[in-house]
Structures are given as C-alpha cells and as structure tokens.
Amino acid sequence: MPDSQPMDSSELKIIKASGQKAFFSEEKVAASLGRAGASQEVIEKILSKLRKELYQGISTKEIYNRAFKLLKNKDHLLASRYKLKNAIYELGPTGFPFEKFVGAVLKYSGYDVEVSDIFQGACVTHEVDVIATQEKETLLMECKFHGTPGKSCDVKVPLYIHSRFRDIENFNKDKKNHPFFFSEGWVVTNTRFTKDATRYAKCVGLKLLSWDYPKGNSLKERIDKSGLYPITVSVLLNKREKQFLLSRDVVLCRELVNDDFYLDHLGISSTRKKHILEEMQSLCKT
C-alpha cells in the first residue's frame, strides 16, 4: 500500500506511460497546468495537495488524474484545456476521427481539405489520409494515431510513408495532361517521433507533426493558438454523447457551436445544452 505520509518529491520515482522510471518533476506538472491557463495561486494549491498523495512508483497517469480532478474542482474550463492530450486519445479507437480532426484543423487554417482519397502510384495505388490545398500548395498527409500513451513513431514510419509519396510523385511527374504535383509530404501523429525518425525526415524533406514537434508549432501548440479543440476535451459531455457527435462528423468544439441541433438529437435539456455551448464557445475563444 502507498505510504500516506508526505514525502520529498525530489526523491520520488514515477512510472511513465512507456514503462520507464523517472524522477517526478513538479516543474512539468506546474508547466502543464500553466499552459491550461491556471493561475500561479491555483497551481501552488494543486501541487500542495499532490505532494500529500504521491508515493514511490506512482504512474504518470495517476498523477494526471489527480491533478485533473483538483483542477476540475477549481474551474471546469481550465480542466477541459488541461485534458487536451487525453482528449485526442479519446478520438479512438480507430484512427479515422483523428484524420478528420487533423483535416478540420487545416480547414480552419485556410486550406481546402479532403479526408481519405486514393492516388495512383508508379507501382501501386495508395490511400492518403488528408489532402490539404491552399493556392498552389498541396500537402499529402498520413496520420498515425495511437490510442494509448507511451507509443512513439520510429524511423520505419517516415521510411514507409516517404516511399509511398515518392511512388505517387513518380507516377505523375511525367504526365503532360493534368499533372498532379504535391508540395510536401507530411506524417502527423498524436504521440511522438523518435530521434531517428526526425533525423530521417529532415534528410529527405518529409514534414513531421506530433504532439510536441516541431517546437513552437507542434500539434498541441497549434490547437492552443487557434482554439480548435476537439469535442472530446469537454468535461460536460459524457462518452456516449461524444461518440454520437464524432459519428456525425462533429469533431471540433467550433463545429458543435455552429451545429448545436445535434445536442437536441441527444435529448439534452435546455439548461444543460446552454452550459455545454458556453463551454464550447469559451474554448473557441481561447
């Protein structure tokens, strides 16, 4: 059983999602709470309570759950922002809602978007997850979704995707009638890339986008800057309601604000509907 007495957090070993052990970092917890918009006062109160509950071998998932619960008690809107990473996992279990989410983010960023299309290659045909076009720029994007934390995309992923994009390019480069050229090939994941994966992608000119890469323009930073949060961040909608909305291609909070009649199909009361839409609108304004 875990020791109920507070302990020195600097000596605390935690278990990461990958199964690896690491020292607990109050700074990382404080930074994640700060990114969600929590004030320094709220952060200090949460850390103070966490210190009394931590024990050797506690998992990062359990630390997150406890911090999330404490933040939710303070401000449910901040809790919605804090759960962004987990909310993207909730887009599963298949990868298709994640593809729609990536497409929706690009659409609201000014691109014309198609999700899932077939392209002829020199050798075989290929299904491409997201095609984003803006003026003369065309992006072909492959989405790699992981439903559980701790998994990374290793070098085999960009190797494989790069060869597929080159096959499409080789088929089209000599076509004189209606040639198709794409500007860039992308790989997008909700987790992380290994160092070899990023090194290879840089070498061949393949663009990568992950939860925390590239620094300054990562997936989480793009979402926070644009306010394009998935509906799964909501702390007011339950799992069944979220799955219903995703099945109707309502992926973003912004889309639900524009198409709120879907909440009527769920039989949600007018009072609860008002609170849900207020939550969605506040996230969109972030």
Image (spheres, helix red, strand yellow):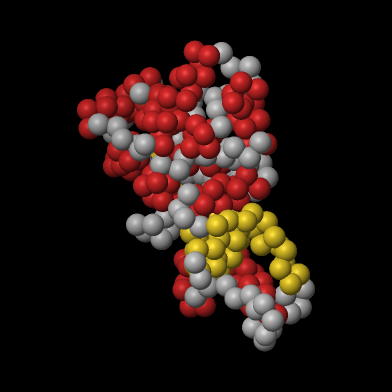
Side (left or right) of 119 relative to 40: right
Residue depicted at 50% across the width and 32% down the height: 257
Which of the image's four quarters has the C terminus? top left
Percent across and percent down for residue 63 are 42, 33
Instruction: Give the camera-side residue of 177 and 195.
Output: 177
Side (left or right) of 121 relative to 104: right
Image height check: is 81 above or below 176? Answer: above
Instruction: Give the camera-side residue of 82 and 54.
Output: 82
Instruction: Give the camera-side residue of 234 and 147.
Output: 234
Side (left or right) of 226 relative to 129: left
Residue depicted at 58% across the width and 56% down the height: 113
Percent across and percent down for residue 193 are 50, 60
Quarter of the image where one finds residue 152: bottom right
Quarter of the image where one finds residue 215: bottom left
Q: Is residue 191 visible?
A: no
Residue depicted at 47% across the width and 19% down the height: 274
Instruction: Give the camera-side residue of 49 and 253.
Output: 253
Residue depicted at 59% across the width and 17% down the height: 268
Percent across and percent down for residue 55 are 40, 31
Image height check: is 192 above or below 33? Answer: below
Count of numbered badges drawn on the protein: 0
Percent across and percent down for residue 182 are 57, 72
Q: Is residue 42 visible?
A: yes
Residue reaching furthest left? 41
